[in-house]
Image (cartoon, grey):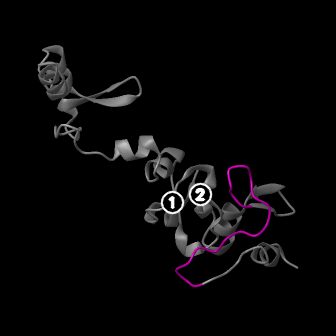
Amino acid sequence: MTRLERYTSYVDQRGPDDCWPWTGHRSEKNYGQFADGKRGSMPAHRFGFSELRRTLEPGEIVDHTCHNRDENCPGGNTCEHRACQNPAHWEAVATDWENGSRGKSFAAVNARKTECKWGHDLTDPANSYGRKGRRQCKKCARLAAAGKHPRQLAAAERLF
């Protein structure tokens, strides 16, 4: 049996648009693991991508696009999309950061926001800056420093 035949024996191939779960061993982060016989154990989707799509460039990451489309996926280590082996659901991205920013983590969701909670533009570099590992709205910061932020005004009204 070739390595590719062995790999495909662990893939539950379903319809062309469905996820194809990995039926073999999974890592603690729920990624399929494949022992290819040459390099030891590796993520199954990386092996599959290299065999079924194209050779990955050094540093490239395989993004499971099915994860990004599923609004009900909880993400994290329970995400079943991590074990998906459908080549149509894979896309090579240049960095871990790009892969993560497409996902559903708290940081990724906030990075995609274009406005702060109070409607101020966060895409304008003149109105946002990094603070303690997160983006801060400068307009909100100025209003808060002056005691005039909507949150402060609402709290003051509740006192009376």
Q: Residue at x 71, y 63 (%)?
A: 44
Q: Nearer the viewer, residue 15 or 91?
A: 15
> Residue 154: x percent and y percent?
15, 27
Q: Magenta segment, which residues?
A: 15-32
Which labelled disc corresponds to residue 79? 2
User: Residue sitting at 12 percent across and 23 percent down?
Assistant: 157
**Front position in the image: 8 or 142:** 142
Which tag, 2 or 1, sits closer to the chain's start?
A: 1
Residue 31 - label: none
Residue 10 at x, y percent in the picture: 77, 73
Circle 2 SS class: loop
**Neighbours of disc 1 within 10 Å: few (<14), some (14-19), many (20+):** some
Q: Is residue 96 above or below residue 30?
A: above
Question: Which quadrant is home to the C terminus?
Answer: top left
Q: Amino acid at mark 1?
A: Cys
> Compared to 42, does 138 lie above or below?
above
Q: Is residue 21 magenta?
A: yes
Q: Residue at x 72, y 61 (%)?
A: 32
Question: Is disc 2 surrounded by few (<14), some (14 to 19) or many (20+) residues within 10 Å?
Answer: some
Pick the front one: 159 or 115: 159
Q: Amino acid at mark 2?
A: Cys
The residue that mark 1 highlights is: 73
Q: Residue at x 80, y 61 (%)?
A: 25
SS label for mark 1: loop
| 149 sits to left or right of 34 | left
